[in-house]
Image (tube, grey):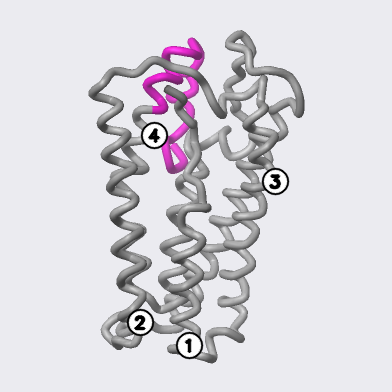
């Protein structure tokens, strides 16, 4: 089975996310012309474009840790399948809730305080995500077949301090978007991602320990999602 390391694809959420943002914009038309709203649209677009541009290179990577062939137990296979199923269910529930965008209950309790801090968090998330993608891409070769003896543990860029910067950036972007868009549903969806992100990172690290002898020292110097 192929384990994809440090990857939570934005492709699966772009569609329903755009629909939700469109409904929010209709609910609060002035938001469409605000700087925070422009940052949100530009930020998610940049994440999508960055992922698409680097995807080809990382899939052909012969010198990185982005993908690897590993043997996993049947129990772990079921854990991965359960996480994916839960992720799909979350997306379905969130998409269904878009139909209730007119209900004011989702927009109460927000203020300019949330918009300001949401914008700051969102900018940090985008910079973190794009930088980590560039680091992974720069450690890969554009050509050549994947070889087991060419694994390299990336420890530069965001990976110098954090072991899983991309899932963290993805999570922060959702949290920030909920603040800026005045939509509590996005916040709830982000919280539902936490157990999936943590579980996947634990499975990834289990195999990274097997492949890289130096990974134990790397863990001591870095935090899983936050600075150590």
- In percent of the image, x 60 and y 26: which residue is there? 154
Q: Is residue 189 left or right of residue 119?
A: left
3 or 4: tag closer to the N-terminus: 3
Q: Secondary structure at mark 2?
A: loop
Q: Which residue lies under the disc numbered 3?
A: 53
Depth-wise, is mark 1 or mark 4 nearer the camera?
Answer: 1
Kindly indicate whether the residue at mark 1 contacts the one at mark 2 (C-beta within 8 angstroms): yes
Kindly indicate whether the residue at mark 3 contacts the one at mark 2 (C-beta within 8 angstroms): no
Q: Which residues are magenta?
A: 204-228
Expressed as whole percent of the image width and height from the top left, the position of residue 54 reads: 67, 41
Q: CA distance from mark 2 to mark 1?
A: 9 Å
- In percent of the image, x 29 and y 18: which residue is there? 73
> Within 10 angstroms of label 2, few (less than 14), some, or many (20 or more) residues?
some
2 or 3: tag closer to the N-terminus: 3
Q: Is residue 141 left or right of residue 93?
A: right
2 or 1: tag closer to the N-terminus: 1
Q: Which residue lies under the disc numbered 1?
A: 26
Q: Which residue lies under the disc numbered 4?
A: 201
Answer whether residue 218 is magenta in the image: yes
Answer whether residue 124 is magenta in the image: no
Q: Is residue 38 left or right of residue 22?
A: right
Expressed as whole percent of the image width and height from the top left, the position of residue 96 reads: 31, 70
């Amino acid at each position: 089975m192929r384990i994809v390391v440090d990857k939570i694809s934005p492709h699966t959420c772009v569609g329903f996310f755009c629909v939700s943002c469109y409904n929010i914009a209709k609910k609060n038309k002035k938001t469409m012309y605000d700087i925070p709203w422009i940052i949100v649209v530009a930020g998610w677009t940049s994440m999508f474009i960055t992922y698409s541009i680097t995807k080809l290179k990382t899939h052909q990577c012969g010198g990185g840790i982005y993908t690897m062939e590993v043997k996993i137990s049947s129990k772990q296979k079921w854990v991965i399948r359960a996480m994916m199923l839960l992720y799909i269910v979350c997306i379905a529930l969130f998409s269904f809730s878009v139909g209730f965008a007119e209900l004011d209950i989702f927009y109460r309790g927000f203020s300019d305080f949330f918009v300001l801090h949401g914008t700051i968090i969102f900018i940090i998330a985008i910079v973190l995500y794009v930088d980590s993608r560039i680091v992974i891409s720069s450690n890969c070769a554009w050509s050549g077949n994947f070889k087991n003896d060419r694994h390299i543990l990336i420890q530069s860029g965001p990976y110098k301090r954090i072991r899983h910067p991309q899932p963290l950036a993805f999570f922060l972007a959702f949290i920030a978007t909920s603040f800026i868009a005045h939509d509590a549903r996005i916040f709830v969806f982000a919280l539902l991602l936490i157990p999936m992100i943590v579980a996947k990172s634990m499975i990834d690290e289990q195999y990274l320990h097997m492949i890289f002898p130096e990974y134990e020292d790397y863990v001591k110097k870095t935090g899983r999602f936050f600075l150590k």
